[in-house]
Amino acid sequence: MHGFAEIKLVDDINHIPVKFNILRKAPGFMLDWYIRKFNPFTAEDAQILGERGFLVKMPLTALDMRERQEYFNEQAARTLYSLRDYGVGIVLPPAMPVNELSEARFPDILPIADGRLVFAIFMMQAIEKTLKLTGKSIRTAEIAIIDGNKSITMSVLDTIYPHVNYLTLITDLDYSQKCTQMYNDCGLNVNMSDFNRSSLESADIIINIRDDNKYDYYYKRGAIYFQLAHRNGAQIAAKRDDILIVDGLRLSCRLSMDRVEDISLPRFECGLFTMSHEYRKLKSGYSSRSIRPVAERVNTLGYSVRGLMLCGRDTKEPHHCLRPPIP
């Protein structure tokens, strides 16, 4: 099986399932002992994109995540091992603290649905929507990709390269074979280097897949910045309030004349991972044969980019109401 599990925390200790209610009134160490021994999480059936999975509630609270991080990590790991035994293939974790000093981590025992790879697949739609804010066309826009995960970078390249004329790839890996293939396909000559300050300073669109903040001060004012790294958009905005930061997408599908279904990237990834063997291959490591069948499968689902997540804020305004930073 390759089902998913969407994981939630309980609101407080009164929602932790225990065999004896007296434990709720006992000293805290006794409840901790019970949880460590029995790990009483709950699971109920759930569906995403028509695929079956579980909605799981761990016997942990948001307070545990913030203030008892070692305990939280230990219990989260136990829950994931149990879910793996039940046949779960991917998990959608609860929102984790954005504080970089926090030691709370969701274990990578199972693949995590962070939505980054799905973001890459929908990147062309996202670029087209944001370019409407600037009046530029995709053919004249300068695009810079900062590599940090080869599978995601290759997926972004496969998605956008037939449509662009000016592309810089900043990486310390060898993409020469891919660059040759893109040149042979459509004549695109990719500027590739381990660091190119001038290209970053002139780029209209930045697609950042790198987790650190090495390049944050090099982007030009008014640039559109797509965040595909494991960073919080608000942390970048605190330093760069002169760029438009897009760190997520809202997808939608019209199910009927009067019904539209919205879905987040991580939830979409749970369903796609469960239904598509090719996507599971792509998630585990890039294959040049994987992106096309995955993109075709995504197209059959009928979802498109409806909204932008700006520094974690879900915008539902029409895109023409959003204003880019003043250059």
Image: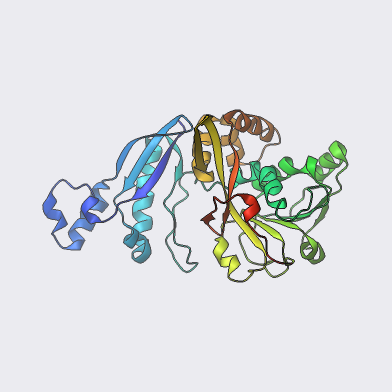
What residue appears at the point 53 percent right and 57 percent down from the top-left corner?
312
| Residue found farthest to the left | 22
Q: How many marks?
A: 0
Residue 108 horizontal side relative to residue 233, left or right? left
Residue 313 horizontal side relative to residue 24, left or right? right
224 and 191: which is toward the camera: 224
- Residue 41 vs 256, above or below: the answer is below
Quadrant in the rendering for residue 162: top right
Residue 203 horizontal side relative to residue 257, left or right? right
What residue appears at the point 65 percent right and 52 percent down from the top-left corner?
320
309 and 260: which is toward the camera: 260
How did the renderer colour the structure?
rainbow
147 and 218: which is toward the camera: 218
- Residue 269 vs 33, above or below: the answer is above
Q: Position of residue 60 (x, y in %)?
A: 31, 54
Q: Which quadrant is the C terminus positioned in? A: bottom right
Q: Position of residue 85 (x, y in %)?
A: 38, 37
What residue appears at the point 59 percent right and 31 percent down from the top-left corner?
302
Q: Position of residue 81 (x, y in %)?
A: 38, 43
- Residue 184 vs 147, above or below: the answer is above
Q: Position of residue 19 (x, y in %)?
A: 15, 45
Q: Which quadrant is the N terminus positioned in? A: top left
Residue 143 horizontal side relative to residue 275, left or right? right
